[in-house]
Amino acid sequence: MLLPLLILVVCLIGLWKGADIIVLSASRIAKKLGMSDLVIGLTVIAFATSAPEFAVTVSAALADKSDISVGNVVGSNIFNLFFILGLVAVVGTVKSTKKMVYRDGTVLIGTSILLFIFLYDLTLSQFEGAIFLFLLVAYLAYLFVHKDPEAEFHDDGDFKWYHSFQFIAGTAIIVVSGHYFVDSASEIARILGVSEWAIGVTIVAAGTSAPEMATSLVAVIKGRHGMSAGNLIGSDIFNLLGVLGVASLIKPLTIIPSAFGSITLLTGALFVVVFFMRTGWKVSRVEGVILLLIVVVRWYFDFSG
């Protein structure tokens, strides 16, 4: 038990330090590109922190494990929206904007509904995956072309050539730390007699979402609300359109009927989250607690059953 606990502590430190490096370097990259905190969170940071989901999902598709491919994305997105956003809101109220709610929230909800429709026959075809990738490219192009002059900007200093390498290094630190966090936490859970299923839907989900959690927490503590919320929204959009798009292009993805319930939960969760963002243009601490309670109830049934 001692060694896994030690590794767990080291990984948590690595996640926090890596996230700190990402937030600072990304802000300088954003200034160089003339991008707001929200857009840098929706794009560069979101792509970087979604690396674990991308690796797991594509590997599962190559190994002909479609349920893992789709389940990893859906489970991680639910974890992002309920646990991470809830935790971030409790630590510091997350401010939202009209663009975040009406533009990005609409894209996220629309993408989830489209996934619901595509998987109604329990299969995500290669053609449907191509549609997802096309929509992702179109969304990114729109973000880069239509800049918001009233968006949240922070001046953390001028961009230097080494900030790009710092961003890559920070991403590598949180990806590696997240990997070993999953391994050590799973080992501790097994020692305590927790089931493999419970480990998969809680600890592994938390592990693959660890980069998003660390980055969003650090960002909101530093007052970078657009970067914090943008990271979570962008990661979910990238997971649905990019990760599932690539995975289904490799091989059509087929799920079992019981998995459709989680997709329904994800779609419903998005409406709740966007509604919370719209009320007072923020996700308050009370709303954050509500999101966390939903996760706790879901975990209770996972562990009990």
Image (cartoon, grey):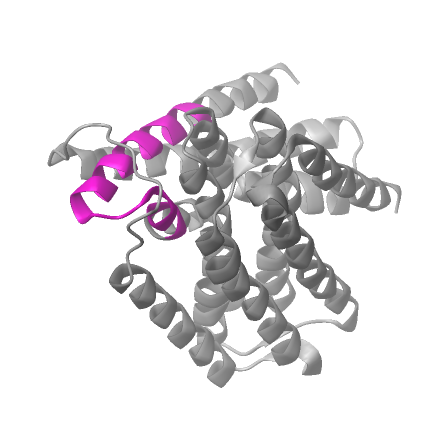
- Residue 85 drawn at (x, y percent): 59, 40
User: Which SS type dominates the magenta stretch?
Assistant: helix
* Farthest residue, direction left: 161
Name the spot of residue 13 as percent of width and height, x first: 46, 20
| Residue 32 among magenta residues | yes
Q: Is residue 12 left or right of residue 5?
A: left
For this rendering, which residue is in front, 33 or 54? 33
**Residue at figure coordinates x 54%, y 31% from the top left:** 181
Residue lying farthest to the right in this orientation: 304
Magenta residue span:
15-42
Residue at 50 percent of width and 47 percent of height = 232
* Residue toward you, 136 or 110: 110
| Quadrant of the frame with the N terminus | top right
Residue drawn at x 67%, y 58% is: 271
222 to 97, vertically: above or below = above
Looking at the image, can residue 57 be seen?
A: no
